[in-house]
Structures are given as structure tokens and as C-alpha cells.
Image (cartoon, rainbow, N blue to C red):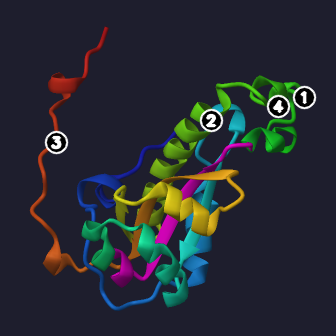
Amino acid sequence: MTTLDTAGRDLLFRDARTHNAWLDRPVAPETLRELYDLMKWGPTSANCSPLRILFLASPAAKERLRPALSQGNLAKTMAAPVTAVLGYDTRFYEHLGALFPHDPTARSWFEGKPSAEPTAFRNSSLQGGYFILAARAVGLDCGPMSGFDAAKLEAEFWPDGRVKANFLCNLGYGDPAKLFPRNPRFAFDEVCAIL
């Protein structure tokens, strides 16, 4: 396997920042499709792929989100060209026949079991990480966040209760002049051990 060069590593990690202010530049629908078509290849348990995404790109869609946002996230979300609502399908196992065809018993591992929702949440979070990296790879800046009322969001966008909210991610072209100073990170020896 080849490795990503320094420029690629910088793009995805070292130079990438969380953005809170946005340039007045729209995100093309094709770019959102390109983002998804890249992130979908990231691995999940039994290829369960529970992530469900709503790309809120219109003012009307953003207004539907407004009542669920915390005050601290309101202005930056309304200003972002796109806000992705990332959720998880609590009945993801219904698709395992197609997504994990080499084991026809896979659905029974989760259907009616208490492990289903934690599996959906964990794997949608994993896919959320891929989502951020894919967004950066296609040239978008990201502003991932919590800070919303999940019950209000779900009632508005997923009222049947099947899909639950995980997190939000503003997308667009960030304004570099309005970035906060870079926050520190732990050193390897502070949080890692090789046993």
C-alpha cells in the first residue's frame, strides 16, 4: 500500500481547521455527491453503514433546523452554505442482506437485540469521521458540532423515529481570517501506550 504524501496529510489533518465563519460561496450539489461517494468506502462493522445524511442547503431547510439549535451554534449554522445533519438508522440491519451478503444470518445478530442501537451509533460516528475527511479531500471546510436539541431535530426531520441524530457538520469554504488560534493536542506518550 502506498502512503499519502505530506501535502495530503496536511490537507486532511495538520492544516485542516474547524471553521465557524464562512465565505459567501455556494457548495455545488455535485461536490456533496463527490463527498458521499468517497466517504462511503470507509469500513463499518459487518458493512452495516448506518449513517444517514441530510444536506440542508436551502434557506427553508435551515429555518426548519433553527428551533433545534443551541444559541452558540445558531449564527454560524445559519450562515454556513450547507449544514449536514448526520444521523443513524436504528434498523440498519434490514439492509444487511444487500450490504453483507456472504452471511445470510447477519440480520439476526441485531434485529430485536439491545446491541442494535449502540452498533448504529458507534458506526455512524465512525462514518462521521470519514465524512469530515472526505469533505476536506474534496476541498470543503467543516464545522462539526453538537449543541442541538436532538428531540426537536428528529421530530422535524425524522418524525417516524427510525433515524436518530448523531451530530451536525457545517460545510462550505471557511473564512481563514476568522479562525481561532489552533488548540493544542496531546503528545503520543500522554495518551498512548504500546504494549
Marks 3 and 2 in Cβ contact (< 8 Å): no
Instruction: Name the secondary structure under disc 3.
Output: loop
- The Cα atoms of the two marked residues, 4 and 3, are separated by 40 Å
Residue lying at 25% horizontally and 62% vertically, measured from the top left: 17
- Residue 87's x, y, as percent? 57, 54
Residue lying at 61% horizontally and 67% vertically, measured from the top left: 157
Marks 4 and 1 in Cβ contact (< 8 Å): no
Instruction: Name the secondary structure under disc 4.
Output: helix
Q: Quadrant of residue 118?
A: top right
- The residue type indicated by label 4 comes to Arg
- The residue type indicated by label 3 comes to Arg
- The residue type indicated by label 2 comes to Glu
- The residue type indicated by label 1 comes to Pro
Which badge, 2 or 4, is on the more N-terminal residue? 4
| Residue range corresponding to the magenta coloring | 77-91
Left or right: 180 as drawn, with respect to 58: left
Identify the mark at residue 185; answer none if there is no mark: 3
Q: How many neighbours does mark 1 have within 10 angstroms: few (below 14), some (14-19), or many (20 or more)? A: few
